[in-house]
Image (spheres, rainbow, N blue to C red):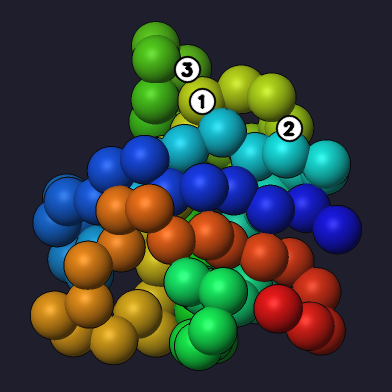
Amino acid sequence: MAWMLIEDSFPSPYGGVAVTGRPHDGDLTRGDQLWLTDGTTRHPVTIARVLHMCGRRPRDVAPAGLNAAFELTGAPPGLTLTGLRLLLGDTA
C-alpha cells in the first residue's frame, strides 16, 4: 500500500491546500483517493493534481522515492497537515 508522510503544507497556487513529501511503497497519481490519518482518525482526500517540484514539470504520477507536491481536495479546514500520513487503500 502506497503512503506518504506529509513534510509541509501550504496554500496551493490553484486554490485549496498543497502538501509535500516522498511517496513510499508505490506511486501516487492524480485522482487517487487517499486517507489522511494521524493513526487514530482518518479523513478521505483526493489528489487533485501533482504539482511542479524540484525542477520537474507537472505530471500525473509521483513515483515512489522522489520528492513530490500534491494539491489535495477534501482536507478538513484548519487541520494541521504536517506530520500526518496519506495512505492509499481501503484501510488506514
Q: Amino acid at mark 1?
A: Asn
Residue 83, horizontal then vertical, whole percent: 38, 53
Marker disc for residue 76: none
| 2 or 3: mark nearer the eye | 2
- Give neighbour class at mark 2: few <14, some 14-19, many 20+ (Cα, 10 Å): some
Q: Residue at x 30, y 53 (%)?
A: 82
Q: Earlier in the sequence, mark 1 or mark 3?
A: 3
Q: Which residue in the protein does label 2 denote?
A: 64
Residue 48 seen by the camera: no
Q: Residue at x 22, y 77 (%)?
A: 79
Q: Is residue 20 above or below residue 67?
A: below
Residue 46, horizontal then vertical, whole percent: 53, 74
Q: Which residue in the protein does label 1 denote?
A: 67
Q: Amino acid at mark 2?
A: Ala
Q: Earlier in the sequence, mark 2 or mark 3?
A: 3
Residue 59, horizontal then vertical, whole percent: 57, 37
- Label 1, label 3: how far apart the Cα atoms are: 10 Å
Q: Residue at x 73, y 39 (%)?
A: 24
> Residue 70 vs residue 90: left or right?
left
| Quadrant of the rendered image containing residue 65 | top right
Residue 86 seen by the camera: yes
> Residue 25 vs residue 24: left or right?
right
Q: Which residue in the protein does label 3 denote?
A: 56
Quadrant showing the N terminus:
bottom right
Quadrant showing the C terminus:
bottom right
Q: Is residue 1 above or below residue 51?
A: below
